[in-house]
Amino acid sequence: MMSSLLYCRRFLLTSSSSIDSSSISSFLLSGSSRRRTLSSVSDTKTEDAKRKRPPLKSFTVNYLLNSCGLSLESAKSRSKFVKLSSSKRPDSVLALLKTNGFTFEQITRVVNSFPSILIVNPESVLLPKLLFFRSIGLTSSDTAKLISNCPTTLSLSLQNRLIPCYDSLKSILVEKESILKCLRRGYWIFTLDTVKYLAARLSLCRDAGVKDQSIRRLVQNGPLVFFCSERKFNEVLTRVRSFGFDPKKMYFIHAMLVFSHVSESTVERKFELYQQFGWSRGEFVAAFMRFPNCVKISDEKIKGTMEYLVNDAGLKAGAVAMQPFVLGLSLEKRIKPRNMVISELLSKGFVKREDLNYFQILKVKECVFVDKFVLKFQHVSSLQPSL
């Protein structure tokens, strides 16, 4: 307004004609109108520019939705953690994953859990890690599964975390195949400080009297148990020792694997079930020590197997407790067919009961059983070799 008044004063001083007050008012109003018009034009241009250039967040959401397979809700949520201004970098990341064996579903899972992967340098950051996994023996499929199940693995330092983790596993497992078995069972291991975990767990196990061979078996087959929290690890170790398992025996490790998944109340409930078939507490403990998985078997399978072995096969419940491995065999595919063959041979007098070890018959491989009890009597029996 002040500038308009000054301009008006200069105009009056230089003008040779007489100007009345109405002219001055008209002049001021026209100036204000011109400013509003210019302002409106400027605002319109800004709005047009905004419409032509979509917001950064909208581009990110659309990319996550259309190129990465995320749901609209997930795309909106993940757009808070990554901002994309173009598709060049994320396209190169997705292309690298695809050429290294990742399925579209796996890529979706990776991006959903770790959206920042879309803005890292694929050649200098991602590729060296993928090549590392390949160098230690993991296939493309293994690597894709490992990373899609634990995407933050790609955010870890190759030199400070991934390589030291592998080296620490190698120090206890030694053989490459054992390390691979461990990794396939524990894809999240790379996210842990394994050097620290190994030192603490090895100390606890050795102090308890567990041999290194057994420890290696635990690390290989039960990484979920070996690398669990210190509180739970101590709890499992204490339960197994208090139950009476000998730490110098391999079944001590089997018991640790079972106790890590089975509560004390479940163990007691399983005992009550076996007790219905005549097992005493001592027989249950003996069976558990020989075959810890006997408490992981479903109630239905326990009932079906025990009823058949005791009632149909004529075995004593106490004998089954001494050979509890039979509880883990398939009732329909192994126990019943073999029992039928042996019953046929007994009825025809081809074999004598006192010469048979029923549990050994159930334990031997299929080819051994067929050769010894089917093919041998095929020429004098109606038995079929396929049994």
Image (tube, helix red, strand yellow):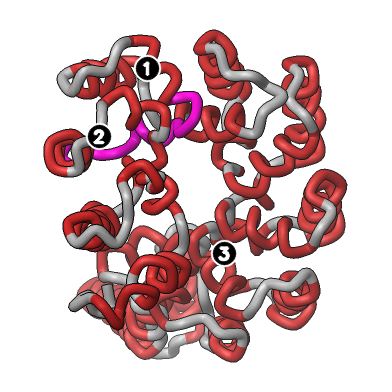
Q: Is residue 53 visible?
A: yes
Instruction: Identify residue for label 1.
Output: 283
Instruction: Single out the mark in the foreground, 2 or 3.
Output: 2
Q: Residues within 10 Å of mark 3 (few under 14, many from 20)?
A: many
Q: Is residue 55 visible?
A: no
* Circle 2 SS class: loop
Mark toward the start of the polypeptide (2 vs 1)? 1
Magenta-drawn stretch, dominant element (helix, strand or loop): helix
Q: Quadrant of the C terminus?
A: bottom left
Q: Residues within 10 Å of mark 1 (few under 14, many from 20)?
A: many
* Circle 1 SS class: helix
- The residues colored magenta run 288-301
Q: Name the kind of residue labelled 3 in the image.
A: Leu
Mark toward the start of the polypeptide (3 vs 1)? 3
Residue at the spot 50% in from the left edge and 12% down from the top edge: 243
- Residue placed furthest toward the front: 349
Q: Name the kind of residue labelled 2 in the image.
A: Leu
Asked if 190 appears above or below 283 in the picture, the reply is below
Report x, y in % for residue 321. 36, 27
Instruction: Single out the mark in the foreground, 2 or 1.
Output: 2
Mark toward the start of the polypeptide (2 vs 3)? 3
* Circle 3 SS class: helix
Q: CA distance from mark 2 to mark 3?
A: 47 Å
Q: Nearer the viewer, residue 229 or 308?
A: 308
Instruction: Identify residue for label 2.
Output: 315
Report x, y in % for residue 56. 44, 74
Q: Name the kind of residue labelled 1 in the image.
A: Glu
Instruction: Identify residue for label 3.
Output: 146
Q: CA distance from mark 2 to mark 1?
A: 15 Å
Q: Nearer the viewer, residue 271 or 307?
A: 307
